[in-house]
């Protein structure tokens, strides 16, 4: 007996992809990251801290940290032990503290204290991968990048906008099919849609503005108010 594998939705047309973005734009014309930050450096740190952690949890942990150190020199002055103690409420805090100190040192020594503005340079920083780099480039420097996290990966596959087996595949397709006028905010529209509407276990399809275009087969019906 062969094992049945889940089939991915067929890709939707570019016109339908554009219609999804148009609807998401109507709901939130100027989407923003939910991570708290005050400059490119604190954004890099916040995004690095957010790996396997919620934005809410990161914001709670980073509030006091950023009050003491909102630049690489001040962060380096705190030292790894103090950073670790201040972020111990979030997952993987020991390794993250080490990375925060490491990236602060590298920014000072190799980039004259300024957060670099290319993916190649950003991914040299400890704890900064492709996804983190794309978030920083988009949010801090206004570059039209798409950072594919679990939410965007789910939305891309479910809707048929960008079917793919890996985040890199989904990113590649999204960059190709997203109309230029929507590219700047595409990352935030898709992540927020995945976070609040296209939920992992029970998507809120009955409230979704793009449900008629989405190729997801097992759409969730509206809850029975009489239950």
Image (cartoon, rainbow, N blue to C red):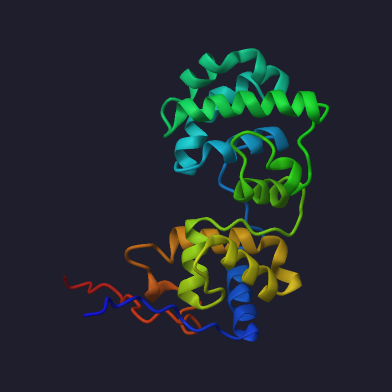
Residue appearing at x 74%, y 59% in the figure: 144
Is 91 on the left or on the right of 33, as rendered? left
Q: Quadrant of the C terminus?
A: bottom left
Q: Quadrant of the N terminus?
A: bottom left
Which one is nearer the viewer's eye here, 25 or 118? Answer: 118
Rendered position, 41 above or below 117: above
Residue appearing at x 69%, y 73% in the figure: 176
Which one is nearer the viewer's eye here, 128 or 215? Answer: 128
| Residue projecting furthest to the left | 227
Which one is nearer the viewer's eye here, 8 or 215? Answer: 8
Rendered position, 103 above or below 132: above
Residue 90 place in picture, x, y as percent? 43, 32
Can residue 39 be seen here? The reply is no
| Residue projecting furthest to the front | 1
Residue 165 place in picture, x, y as percent? 49, 68
Give the image quarter of residue 180: bottom right
Residue 18 place in picture, x, y as percent? 65, 79
Count of marks, rendered view: 0
């Amino acid at each position: 007996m062969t094992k049945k594998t889940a089939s991915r939705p067929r890709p939707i047309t570019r016109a339908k992809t554009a219609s999804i973005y148009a609807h998401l734009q109507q709901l939130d014309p100027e989407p923003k990251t939910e991570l708290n930050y005050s400059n490119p450096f604190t954004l890099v740190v916040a995004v690095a801290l957010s790996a396997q952690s919620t934005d809410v949890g990161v914001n709670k942990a980073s509030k006091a940290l950023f009050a003491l150190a909102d630049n690489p020199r001040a962060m380096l002055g705190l030292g790894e032990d103090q950073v670790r103690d201040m972020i111990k409420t979030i997952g993987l805090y020991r390794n993250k503290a080490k990375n925060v100190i490491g990236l602060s040192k590298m920014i000072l020594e190799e980039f004259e204290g300024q957060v670099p503005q290319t993916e190649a340079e950003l991914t040299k920083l400890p704890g900064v991968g492709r996804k983190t780099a794309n978030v920083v480039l988009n949010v801090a420097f206004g570059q039209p990048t798409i950072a594919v996290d679990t939410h965007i990966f789910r939305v891309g596959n479910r809707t048929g906008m960008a079917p793919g087996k890996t985040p890199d595949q989904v990113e590649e397709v999204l960059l190709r099919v997203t109309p230029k006028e929507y590219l700047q905010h595409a990352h935030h529209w898709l992540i927020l849609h995945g976070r609040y509407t296209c939920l992992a276990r029970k998507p809120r399809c009955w409230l979704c503005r793009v449900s008629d275009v989405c190729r997801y087969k097992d759409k969730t019906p509206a809850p029975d108010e009489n239950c």
